[in-house]
Structures are given as C-alpha cells and as structure tokens.
Image: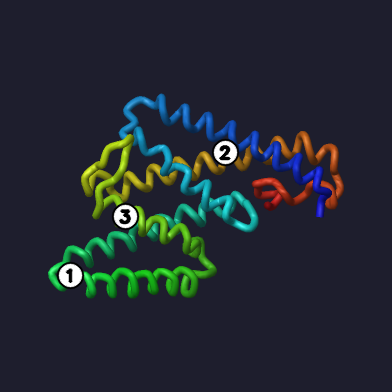
Amino acid sequence: MPPKSVLIEIALFAGIGTGLVCLVGGLMWDFAPFNKYQGMFWLTFMPLILFFMKEKQDRKHLLNMWLSFICGLAWGLVAVGAIAALSPAGPVILDIIIDFLICAAIVFVHKGLLDRTLSNAVACVFLGFAETLGCLQTSFPVAGELLPPMSLNGIDMLVIFTWGTLVTFALSWVCDALIGKFIMGKHPSPEGASAQGPSTERGE
C-alpha cells in the first residue's frame, strides 16, 4: 500500500485530470451546433458515475458498460411493450410483469447466463432499462421544463450515454498521463504509486 501522502498526490492529479476533461466535454456539449440535447448534459455523467463505482477503474470496462446499457434499452422496450399490452389488466399485473419478472430476468440473464460476456454489467443494464421507462413513459425534466413522454427514444439515450462513455475514456487516459508524469517518476517502485489512478494500467 502506498503511503498516505502518495495517495493524496494521486487523488490530486486524478481530480485535476477529471475536472479538465469534464470541463472540455461540457464546453463542447454547450457549443456544439445542432445539439438537440441541450439541457440534458447531466445524463452524460451516468457512465462516469458507474465507472468510478468499479473497484478498479479500468478503461476496458467501458465497452462492457456500453454494451450492457444497450441491453438495458432493449429490456426497457420489452417493459414498454408489456405496459401497452397489459395496462387494461391493472397495476398489480403490470407490477408483477415489470417489477418482478423483468427485473428478475435481468439479474439472472446478465449476472448468470452472460456473466462471462461483455454484457454482464448489471448496473448498466438497469440504467438503460430505467432510462427507457423514464423517457418513454413519463414526462422528462429538461432545463426546468417537462418534456412529454416519447420526446426521447432509445437512439437518443444511446447517443447521450456514448458521449459520456467517450468523455470517461478521455479522462481516464488524461489521469493516467498526469499520474505517470508527476507521480510514477517520483515513486517508481510497486510500493510507491502503481495501482491507484483511474486507469487501465494503474488500477483504482
């Protein structure tokens, strides 16, 4: 375990790298021409949240997260179809179908059957599932106003999540570069600063 002082230095440069990339990403988002997603920038932080929840912040997880999110969008469409077909049956039947059967199926399929595949990030599956239900079935808050249901579709949500994933990839790379330049040079030994940055090579 590196000394506390080294961990603080790593956190400092990881924070600087994260802040810089998020700033650039936000400016690009705000000033991009023909950006139909203005007011939805907060959604791009979802991949970043999920990335930092990993025990080890490894860039190879990003493809895993992205593919799992797409699966979640598909599960969400299944739920929307069930709502359309079974809504006359009442809320109890819908709750059994969506809250029990579909949620149970998501965990069983992605944590069990697909555990050794790139679609096993259950948190990302549930995020895609929840966003689909939220955007297609309820009013959606944007810039202080409520968009009516169906204003966004699965492609829109995938575009936003993809942007957030690319920003997360970039900040991980920048953090690697900063930690490698300013920390690893000073602490070259494995006990120094080898496994603490948000990177592929340096672990957490």
Please state the horizontal and vertical placement of residue 44, each as a whole percent of the image: 44, 42
Between 64 and 98, the residue placed more toward the observer is: 98
Disc assigned to residue 98: none
Identify the image quadrant of residue 81.
bottom left
Identify the image quadrant of residue 61.
bottom right
The residue where tag 2 is placed is 170
Give how far apart the Cα atoms at labels 2 and 1 are.
44 Å
Q: Amino acid at mark 2?
A: Ala
The residue where tag 3 is placed is 132
Please say if 22 is above or below 127.
above
- Residue occupying image coordinates x 29% and y 45%: 140
Label 1: element kind: helix
- Residue occupying image coordinates x 23% and y 74%: 92
Q: Amino acid at mark 1?
A: Leu
Q: Earlier in the sequence, mark 2 or mark 1?
A: 1
Q: Earlier in the sequence, mark 3 or mark 1?
A: 1
Disc assigned to residue 86: 1
Q: Quarter of the image for the N terminus: give it.
A: bottom right
- Residue occupying image coordinates x 46% and y 57%: 124
Label 2: element kind: helix
Please state the horizontal and vertical placement of residue 190, each as a whole percent of the image: 83, 51
Give how far apart the Cα atoms at labels 2 and 3 are.
26 Å
Give how far apart the Cα atoms at labels 3 and 1 are.
18 Å
Residue depth check, mark 2 versus mark 1: number of the one nearer the observer = 1
Label 3: element kind: helix
